[in-house]
Image (cartoon, rainbow, N blue to C red):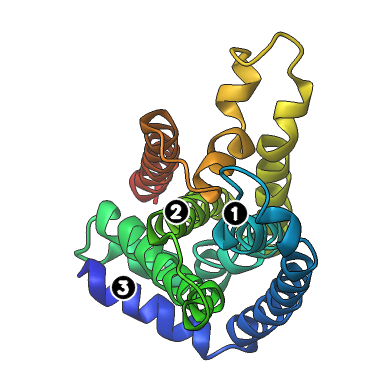
Amino acid sequence: MILNIALRELRSMFLSPLAWTVLAVTQLILCWIFFTQIDSFFSIQKELTTLPNAPGVIDLIAAPVLEVASIILLMISPLLTMRLISEERRNGTLTLLLSSPISISEIVFGKFLGITLFYLILIGMISLMPLSLMMGTELDLGKLAAGLLGLLLLLCSFAAAGLFLSSLTANPVVAAISTFGLLLLLWIIENSSNNGADNIFNYLSLTHHVTPLLRGMVNSVDLAYFALFIITFLLLTIRQMDAERLQG
């Protein structure tokens, strides 16, 4: 049932122009960044040959592309998640969904999986750019895989937070603005840190945990952060919808 709900969500996304527009605009911007980074790499290639342990193409081309992608998708993700539940409530179909013989967990995980499948398609398209460099040079595929994993975990976190905030309102615009505000706060909160690396704001910051992954450095603390972030917001969504089912 979870897979059926996920495929239904994915299908409904591609029936609207929003999903196609997101894919096209994101790819267009990242392609421009990608070719800009390649040009910059060639301009300093001679200097790099004289440096010990010089950064490679993943560090100088792929990682910056993934970092720009994370910023772009921070702005776009609320538009994708705003309708997940709020539109169901606005159209009056949420009552039918809650009264059906489907558990709240299946509904929430199905919708989360649906948006995650869309993100996997998006990440697959983004990965084609750095992978195309294999035609001319050797790539550190481990670093690239870590970067793509970091981007996927970040997008899953965006989806979980957006799903929860979408469950709180019948207005998709309110859900989008609330999601963007929350994600932006968690994105810039690290700038409020004044007490060193162990400051609590660093632990709450999305950028503090995703930046090492995007640059190819995998840390169990960062993986645990994203796992807890996603699980927390999914449980909050389940609790919110369960309370709504009991009230209805």
Mark number for residue 28? none
On residue 59, the disc is 1
Task: Report the number of discs.
Answer: 3
When the figure is inspected, residue 56 is found, relative to residue 90, above or below; the finding is: above
Amino acid identity at mark 1:
Asp
Determine whether label 1 and label 2 are within 8 Å by CB: yes
Quadrant occupied by the N terminus: bottom left
Looking at the image, the residue that sits furthest to the front is 50
The CA span between labels 1 and 2 is: 8 Å
Residue type pointed to by label 3: Ile
* Mark sitting earlier along the chain (2/3): 3
- Name the residue located 50 percent from the left edge and 45 percent from the top edge: 213
| Kind of element beneath mark 1 | helix
Looking at the image, the residue that sits furthest to the top is 195
Earlier-in-chain disc, 1 versus 3: 3
| Residue 42, x across and y down, in percent | 74, 70
> Where does the image place residue 84, in percent across and percent down from the top left?
50, 65
110 to the left or right of 159: left
The residue drawn where x is 78% and y is 66% is: 40
